[in-house]
Amino acid sequence: MAEHNLFQEVQEDLERQKLEALWKKYGPWIVLVALGIVVSTASSSAYRAWRLDRSRKVTAELLVAGQGDMSSVTNTEAYRNFADVHKGESLGSLALLRAGSVALDQNNKAEAIGYFERLASDAKTDPAFRQLGTLLSVQAQLDDGDPETLSRRLDALTADNASWRYSALEAQAYLALRANDKARAEKILTSLSTDRRAPQSLSARAANALRTLN
C-alpha cells in the first residue's frame, strides 16, 4: 500500500511538472487565444443586440409615421433608414421599392431611380428583387431615357425563366417604338398578345397597342 501511494505521488508530481513546463512555454498564447474568443463572442453579441435595437427603433418610427401602416409612410428617408438596417434582406428590398414608389408619387423621379438602382445593384439581395429594381428603373425612364441603352438593360429580364419577363418585353416594345423600330415593336406585341402564359391584362394591352399601330 505504501509503495502504491509513493508511486502515485511520484506520478502526480511528474504530471504537475509537465503541466508547469507546458504552461511556461505556451501559457501566454493560451491566454491570448482565450481572450480572443471572449472578445469575439462579446463583440458579436453586442453587434447583434445593437442591430436588433436599431431595427426596432426604425420600425417603430415607420409605424408611428404611418399610424400603424408602413405602406402609408410618405417620408422616403424613413424607408431608406429601414433599408440600411435590413440591407440584403427581403424587408430592406421592400423598403427600397416603397421608397421609390413614394418618390415617384411626389414627382421626384431622379430620387426614385436612385432607390431602384440601389436595389438592382445589391448583390446580397434576392435576384428577383434585383431584376425588379432594374425593371422599375427602366420604366421610370421610358419617356426620356436612351431607348437602345434601356432596352439592352432589359435583355437579361426577357429570358423564359425570368421573373419579370412579360413586363420587360412590354417595356421593350415601347422603347422600340421610341426608336422608330415599328417592326420590332409589332413582333414583341404580337408575341405578348398570343402568349397564354402572359398575364391577361398585359396581353390585352399588347393587343390594343397592335390595333392602334395597324
Image (cartoon, rainbow, N blue to C red):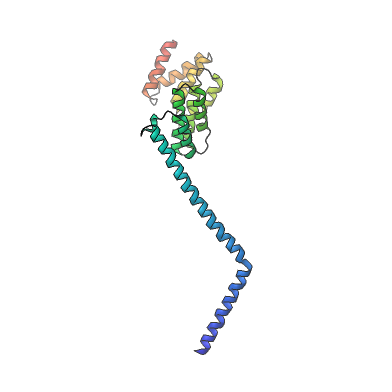
Q: Quadrant of the C terminus?
A: top left
Residue 38 relative to residue 74: left or right: right
Question: Which residue is outermost to the right?
Answer: 25
Q: Mark yes or no: residue 156 visible.
A: no
Residue placed at 55% from the left, 20% from the top?
148
Foreground: 44 or 135? 44
Q: Indicate the position of residue 150 as horizontal and vertical percent values.
A: 53, 23
Q: Indicate the position of residue 136 as horizontal and vertical percent values.
A: 47, 26
Q: Indicate the position of residue 3 as horizontal and vertical percent values.
A: 53, 89
Foreground: 183 or 18? 18
Q: Indicate the position of residue 35 as horizontal and vertical percent values.
A: 56, 59
Total number of numbered labels?
0
Q: Quadrant of residue 20?
A: bottom right
Determine whether 52 is above or below 136 in the image.
below
Residue 125 relative to residue 30: left or right: left
Residue placed at 58% from the left, 78% from the top?
14
Question: Which residue is outermost to the bottom?
Answer: 2
Q: Quadrant of residue 192?
A: top left
Q: Mark yes or no: residue 185 visible.
A: yes
